[in-house]
Image (cartoon, helix red, strand yellow):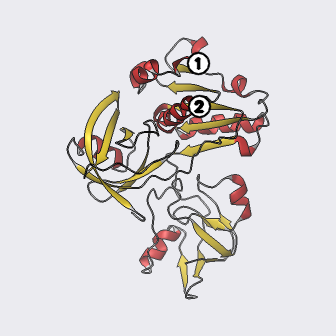
Amino acid sequence: MSGATLSVRVARKAVEAEGICSFELVSADGAPLPAFSAGSHVDVQLPGGQTRQYSLCNDPTETHRYLIAVLRDAASRGGSAAMHDVVKEGDTLTISTPKNHFALAHEAGSHLLLAGGIGITPLLCMAERLANVGAAFEMHYCTRSRSRTAFVERISRSAFAPRVQFHHDDGVPDQRLDIAALLAEPPAGRHLYVCGPKGFMDAVLGAARAQGWPESQLHYEFFSADVAPVAGDASFEVQLASSGRIVVVPADRSIVQALAEAGVTVATSCEQGVCGTCLTRVIEGEPEHRDLYLTPEEQAAGDQFLPCCSRSRSARLVIDL
């Protein structure tokens, strides 16, 4: 974990829905926690040394606690299982200070929040903030079933409850979310925020782009990505600008893995191209972007990339390491 860290205590662990636990984190020394903005996340160092990112979902005016929620993922690489099975009330954890790659566009005329499953966490924080400042917004919260819907009571008791609509996959057909209809003819000044499983996000963003939503009005944060090797991957060279050293990246290794095997450490966290920890400047060559962190415009610029998952279209890539 790079950057400033905090020592926090798990003051409360609670079941919020089927497969979802929340964790209330307070400063280990009782001091106020650093302020955060809606959409922020923290890196959490787990038992066993893994680091995972979790969105803060409490009211951003609070400084006495951070609240995160974790879905037990059957495809977990160990992170969600550790949070559910190992971490308990009273434990001390090391976390990063809050980071925000999914901020509200406060200049927007109105806001549309679309949450899929555990993707409710950053959007719930956004709803708290937007309600506090009197901004115009609506939220749609999609889940597989009522039993898998976290924070229902909290939302129902909130001042913004009338602005939230729930949609369940196992509910009656007329309550399911019609994404195309919702995103048709985007009003001027409206910004869209989406978070949830990749399939849900791909459907929402695809529909929005098809309906002509400007890219500058689309805001999203992925939790995970598929980093499996792609057929046809070839080896290439990476040159470190600081030393001129050249490292060969085999077809079956990521750049981060190849550099590590050569004794060069790159700070990483998710290793899936979603968190931005390993973001590196490209000096020469053309990267092949496979991340879900950079915007399409940032990827097209070609001057930065995420070496945990991305590769190179050119025979050699010179990077700022």
> What is the x, y in percent for residue 190?
72, 33
Q: Is residue 163 above or below residue 79?
A: above
Q: Residue at x 58, y 78 (%)?
A: 238
236 or 294: nearer the viewer: 294
The amino acid marked with disc number 1 is Arg
Residue density around tag 2, few if under 14, some if 14–19, many if 20 or more, within 10 Å: many
Is tag 2's residue or tag 1's residue first in the polypeptide sequence?
2
Residue denoted by label 1 = 176
> What is the x, y in percent for residue 271?
47, 59
Residue denoted by label 2 = 114
- What is the quadrant of residue 95 in the picture? bottom left
Q: Residue at x 65, y 63 (%)?
A: 288
90 or 61: nearer the viewer: 61
Q: Is residue 308 above or below residue 10?
A: below
User: Residue 41 vs residue 301: left or right?
Assistant: left
- Label annotation for residue 228: none
| Screen quadrant of the N terminus | bottom left
Q: For numbered disc 1, what is the local secondary structure?
A: loop
Q: For numbered disc 2, what is the local secondary structure?
A: strand
- What is the quadrant of residue 319 in the picture? bottom right
Q: Is residue 62 above or below residue 294?
A: above
| Screen quadrant of the C terminus | bottom right
> What is the x, y in percent for residue 275?
51, 55
> What is the x, y in percent for residue 2?
42, 65
Q: Tell whether label 1 touches label 2 (CB within 8 Å).
A: no
Inter-mark Cα distance, 2 to 1:
13 Å
